[in-house]
Image (cartoon, grey):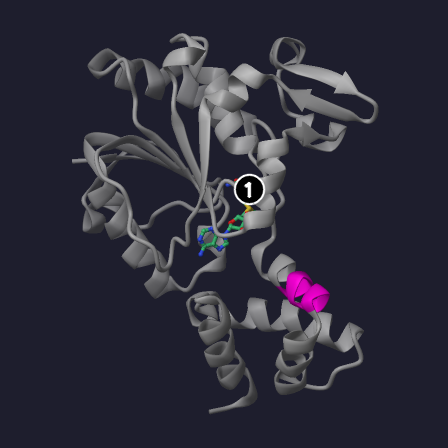
Amino acid sequence: MNDYQQFIANIKRKTGIDLSLYKEAQMKRRLTSLYEKKGLKNFQQFFAAMEKDEALFHEFLDRITINVSEFYRNAKRWEVLERKILPKLLAQNRRLKIWSAACSTGEEPYTLAMILSKFVPLADISILATDIDENAIARAQIGLYTERSLQEIPEEMKKKFFTKEGMYYKIDEKIKKAVKFKKHNLLADPFGRFFDLIVCRNVLIYFTEEAKQKLYHQFNEALRPGGILFVGSTEQIFNPVLYGFEIEDTFFYRKK
Ligand SMILES: C[S@@+](CC[C@H](N)C(=O)[O-])C[C@H]1O[C@@H](n2cnc3c(N)ncnc32)[C@H](O)[C@@H]1O
């Protein structure tokens, strides 16, 4: 076993996270730059240092998770969701079962709740939002955001669902109540069933080809027939039919 493989095995034992399912060159680069900054020479020293230093372990977790997110990320796609996808799904079922997978600090599931509130009362909406990173989830539950993550949000939604508190924008309690957060590792934990809509954006790019293919199958199984998978704007599925999907629109796949 080389230095990195040994590190992968140690991390799996310590955290349950399997780094071998993340693209190797990218992950190695990110981690090497972190340990070199700390004056360490290799992965073995890095792991030993993390065992003694809780703060360094948290920096490592931060480095592997990459929590960047924003409201209405790639706004044109959310427009397609609002104009085309949701009306169709709601015509079949007024109480949609929705999952925002790898939701980071909450911008994505809260965007979903805001858009859905145009169609159904907020009190009837329940969105499951999951991420591997407990810190990100804790921040999502606090619901305070800076101007940066609100750049793409339509002005009317910003006015309706946020109040300014100092340098932060606080999200409306009714939106918060529509989202249930839970820790979940996409690469290890079981999936729910019968979802009408699964949103999984800007995380698949970090995974190996094999890990992605397994996930497409799992997402397909987790949807009800006719249910939709919404992926990120660089994450088109090359051969959706292989996984039981048809193209509904760019970046939207329907389970057959
Ligand atoms: C770049 S953010 C994407 C956030 C949001 N979906 C968006 O598109 O704005 C990637 C998120 O994936 C999460 N993540 C990474 N590996 C994961 C895994 N194995 N299972 C669940 N979430 C994971 C990270 O913690 C991070 O919050």
Q: Residue at x 57, y 32 (%)?
A: 107
**Helix, strand or loop at mark 1:** helix
Q: Residue furthest bottom?
A: 1
Quadrant where the C terminus is found in the figure: top left
Q: Residue at x 44, y 12 (%)?
A: 122
Q: Nearer the viewer, residue 35 or 82?
A: 35
Residue 137 in sight in this render:
yes
| Residue 192 x, y percent position in the rendering | 27, 42
Q: Is residue 245 left or right of residue 136?
A: left
Q: Find residue 106 and report its image quarter.
A: top right
228 over 31 or under it: above or below: above
216 over 97 or under it: above or below: below
Q: Is residue 3 left or right of residue 219?
A: right
Q: Which residues are magenta?
A: 54-60
Which residue is identified by label 1?
137
| Residue 155 x, y percent position in the rendering | 66, 12
| Residue 25 x, y percent position in the rendering | 55, 72
Residue 239 in sight in this render:
no
Residue type highlighted by circle 1: Ile
Q: Is residue 141 left or right of residue 182?
A: right
Q: Nearer the viewer, residue 138 or 62?
A: 138
The answer to if 89 sits in the magenta stretch is no
Q: Residue at x 60, y 13 (%)?
A: 157
| Residue 126 x, y percent position in the rendering | 38, 23
* Label 1 Cα neighbours within 10 Å, binned few <14 / some 14-19 / many ≥20: many
Q: Main secondary structure of the magenta part?
A: helix
Labels in figure, total: 1
Q: Residue furthest right?
A: 166
Q: Residue at x 50, y 46 (%)?
A: 202
Q: Find residue 247 and report its image quarter.
A: top left
